[in-house]
Amino acid sequence: MKIITIISFVVAALAVNATAGMNEFESCRCKNGLATKGDTKQEVLEDCGQPVRHSYDRRECPEMWLYNFGPSEFMQGVCFDNSGRVKKVLSLEQGY
């Protein structure tokens, strides 16, 4: 049930971002460092570890990795472009 909720949320987040402009950033602070715009997937894995979810969408964000840093933080969506580099980071809803 949680996976379906996360998938639905990420799809909805992408749709809302396309029309209303969510909080968009160039970096995401992780346990082992900072995932920054232009970083490769490998660099993000090294800094942030495995995401809780991957989603694929061919519109604005070909691939998004969802990170949940717990209930006291907002979830972060790391959006990759077609070359596999960070395009942007979205601040999503409160983590769980």
Image (tube, rainbow, N blue to C red):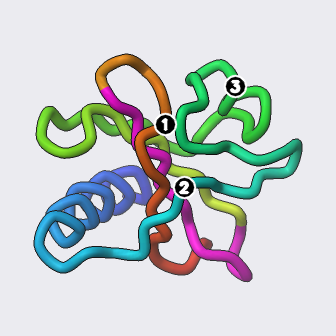
- When the figure is inspected, residue 77 is found, relative to residue 69, above or below; the finding is above
Q: Which residues are magenta?
A: 70-81
Helix, strand or loop at disc 1? Answer: strand
- Furthest-right residue in this view: 32
- Left or right, 22 with respect to 69, comes to left
* Spot occupied by residue 82 in the image (x, y as percentages of width and height): 30, 22
Helix, strand or loop at disc 2? Answer: loop
> Would you name the residue on which mark 2 appears?
26
Disc 3 residue type? Glu
Sequence-wise, the earlier of marks 3 and 1 is 3
- When the figure is inspected, residue 40 is found, relative to residue 95, above or below; the finding is above
In this rendered view, identify the residue nearer to me: 74 or 52. Answer: 74
> Would you name the residue on which mark 3 appears?
43
The dot on residue 86 is 1
In this rendered view, identify the residue nearer to me: 34 or 12. Answer: 34
Sequence-wise, the earlier of marks 1 and 2 is 2
